[in-house]
Amino acid sequence: MEIWIRQAPDSDSAKTAKKLADAFTQASGVKTKVVALFDDFETKLNQQAAQKQLPDIVINDTAQLGNMQSQGWLREVDKASLAGGDKLSDRAWSAATGSDGKIYAAPFSAQAFALIVRKDWREKVGMQPPATWEDLAKLATAFTQKDPDGNGQADTAGFVIPAGTKRGYASWYASSLIYANGADFLKAAGPGKYTATANDPKFVEAVQYLQDQFCKSKTVNPGAVSNDTTVTHEVFEKGQGGIYLVGPYVLARFVKSVGTDKIEVLPVPKGPAGGPGTLGEGENVYMMVGSSMEDAQKKFAEYAISPEGQKIGMNKDANGAIVRLPVNTTVDMAAERQDPRWKVFQESYEFAVYAPPVPNWAPIRQTSADAINTVWADCTADVKTAMDGLNTKLTQELQSQKAS
């Protein structure tokens, strides 16, 4: 049985996936082959689909559900017949549900976004953990202007941001602050129907706050508007910036590369107009159509959501976790991981916001990223006008998806 996972080949996460597959083989007798791919993952899936050779299992982002389901790649899942399905959190199941209300995956991993901050820098500039957006902006300014690394050079920034448009990163990053201010990209308007809300004042305020960081305070790392997460991880590790709003999957990596005493995890402060909120994401186990091994697909999904499968995926405190927060409610995270910083991510999950189950979220994220990136890259751009334009485009996209 072939299992694809969106992770870099030979990475620690790919090794954890192999460990999970090997344990499944030992428990079930079903032989497996793990294929780890990162760049252009969906493009390669498209190529496989064109050749009618989709893998049997795909472990991929929850936000890709609509994209894959709309192309007819996914088997529907009978929640009641999936052993252990009743042990999974309702919030995780919601991220496995399509716009038609049917379930198309087994939830596997969850995550919420929080701030990974250079604790040593914060203490050096003599500031408390930020409780408001104003506090956060002041901390970013101090990191930019007060030489927190003490090398005598003006070579540090407050925020490190993957603000490029590839895979919709600018929108992906901004969404945590948008949700933290009580706004959203869309609002429900009846079963399967949505209205675009990108020009809501709370939404505009969040994007404006970040434009101010790029353009007025100049507290964002240089070149951020062209960067993806791969580059941004390295920017943080090189000590070029001190505040990274990101998921928990990099915590173990940064503990190792930056130093455990130098970093802390803090919740995203609620915005001036609403909140709390932050981006919720995760990974699902997708059972792909066309497989000759449907029984084995189901067995793998059941193993992946079992306490044993979840614990293997969590990988304790080591780098390479493919289960960030367990979706199985019987798994005690504190017993598996000793690092208390994970608890901040777990508590943030309580108010995390998933992408809504529109037929295809990918073009909505990409269109939003293009508009948001533009106002961050062009300091003369008017945010309200740009978000009005984005709202019009999102409305058209919803119409094309018959979801308005």
Image (tube, grey):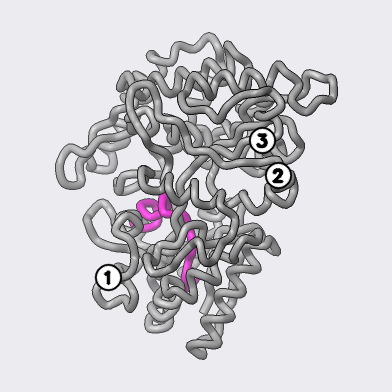
Residue at 46%, 69% (x, y): give it. Answer: 52
- Of helix, strand and loop, which one carries label 2? helix
Left/right of residue 282 with respect to residue 15 in the rendered view: left
x then y, percent, for residue 291: 42, 77
Q: Is residue 215 above or below residue 73?
A: above
- Of helix, strand and loop, which one carries label 1? helix
x then y, percent, for residue 177: 44, 30
Instruction: Using the rendered view, name the quadrant where residue 403 is placed.
Output: top left
Left/right of residue 68 with respect to residue 5 in the rendered view: left
Q: Residue furthest bottom?
A: 29
CB within 8 Å, label 2 to label 3: no
Residue at 55%, 71% (x, y): give it. Answer: 312
Which residue is denoted by mark 1 in the rendering? 79
Please name whichever residue, 143 or 58, is drawn nearer the observer in this view of the structure: 143
x then y, percent, for residue 133: 47, 23
CB within 8 Å, label 1 to label 3: no
Give the distance between the C-alpha atoms of the residues marked 1 and 3, in whole angstroms: 42 Å
Q: Which mark is residue 261?
A: 2
Which amino acid type corresponds to the residue marked 1 in the rendered image? Lys
Residue 292 makes an appearance in the image: no
Instruction: Using the rendered view, name the quadrant where residue 274 is placed.
Output: top left
Residue 322 makes an appearance in the image: yes
Which amino acid type corresponds to the residue marked 3 in the rendered image? Arg
- The mark closer to the camera, 2 or 3, is 2
The range drawn in magenta is: 54-69
Q: Nearer the N terminus, badge 1 or badge 3?
A: 1
